[in-house]
Image (cartoon, helix red, strand yellow):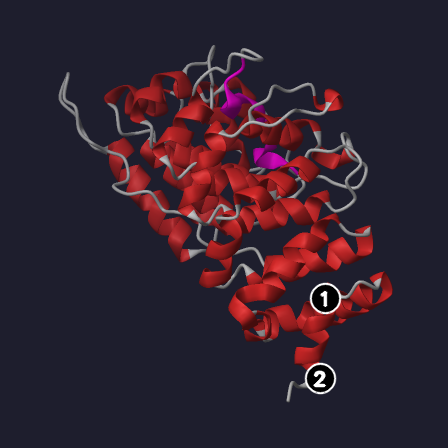
Amino acid sequence: MPTELEELVGFIASPNANIRLLATENLVPFSASQPALFKTDELTPIKHLKFLIRDHPKIAEHALTCLINLTAEKDVLEYVATDDRFLGILLGLLVEPDEVNANLMAMLLANLTKWDGLKSLLNRKQPAPEKLKSDDRVINQLMDLFVKGADGTYNKHADYDYLSYVFADLSKHEEIRHYFVNRQDYDDVIPINKIKVFTEHKSDIRRKGVASIIKNAAFDIPSHPAFLDEDDVNILPYILLPIMGGEVYPEDEALEMLTDLQLLPPDKQRDPDSSNILTHLETLTLLTTTRAGRDLMRSISVYPIVRETHLRVNDEAVQDACERLVNVLMRDEAEGEEIEGGAATAEEEDDIVEV
């Protein structure tokens, strides 16, 4: 005989909207604490939850929250991420400018991109809303949502911060790293140039995701000249500013720094999340892979910035990363010598987003 909770799960598929609302609302906490409740009858409750993302907004909200929690389970993640029709519905709703649950949809998509097969988003297409002014490639639409929709400017119900986690996971794949570092035909812009401005954004989620995207993109060694070129991507100011505070440097060191890094106000705050500082330090280390990258960082006084970060951030992982980077920058190199200085492997962002 089914328990009361099992009966409640069955009410997800009720033809009565009030019963569906009551059932989904009360099941939200159990979707995190007792996921097995939703795995009966070959995941039929999950199938019903997927259908409900198009229901009344409050029912859809609860269904999406349940799915966000449940896709922390590997079998549920695979079941949802491999449903191409559901993905089409989810992506179509996400880009609509009046979708009230867009942030939850972005969170769910962030979970689904843990499934490696979701790199297929690179080649997926759908019509774009006129307001978005994008092309028919889904990845370009998501990028434009992330940039144009920050702070509710595209959809008053959403900020799309969790799309940064979507891109962070996707950028672990080589073909999608190439997307971030290559100019796109539809707007003639390199995608990483669109997102680099968010490394000091007020949103913790957005900063963390963007830091990871930049780091993953930096594994594309052939793109390093563009990364470092002031007239191209010019990434260094955007990864150095977040690790800097309001400390005062000796004049000889300050004058060699990039113009954007000089004369910072005394109340300048470095990123309060030490994991973001660590990510930026790892990106800097990746950018020392080539001799040109190392020589540039030496010439613009990156060492003093790393020195102060080591002194002022009380985090063992950050201090270790500072020491590794300093060892690369301070060692002697013969003229024309080429030494591999970057990190050896990509550190992937693996956390499942949960509500």
* Residue 198 place in picture, x, y as percent: 60, 32
Residue 341 drawn above or below residue 316: above
Please tell me which residue is depicted at 56% across the width and 39% down the height of the picture: 164
Q: Main secondary structure of the magenta part?
A: helix
Query: CA gap, disc 2 to disc 1?
Result: 13 Å
The part of the chain drawn in magenta is: 189-201
**SS of the residue under disc 2:** helix
Quadrant housing the N terminus:
bottom right
Mark 2 — residue?
4
Residue kind at label 2, given as amino acid type: Glu
The answer, for residue 351, to whether it is visible in the render is no
* Residue 69 place in picture, x, y as percent: 60, 62
Mark 1 — residue?
12
Say how many tags the image has.
2
Quadrant in which residue 99 is drawn: top right
What numbered label is drawn on residue 340? none
Please tell me whether residue 32 belongs to the stretch shown in magenta.
no
* Residue 241 place in picture, x, y as percent: 53, 32
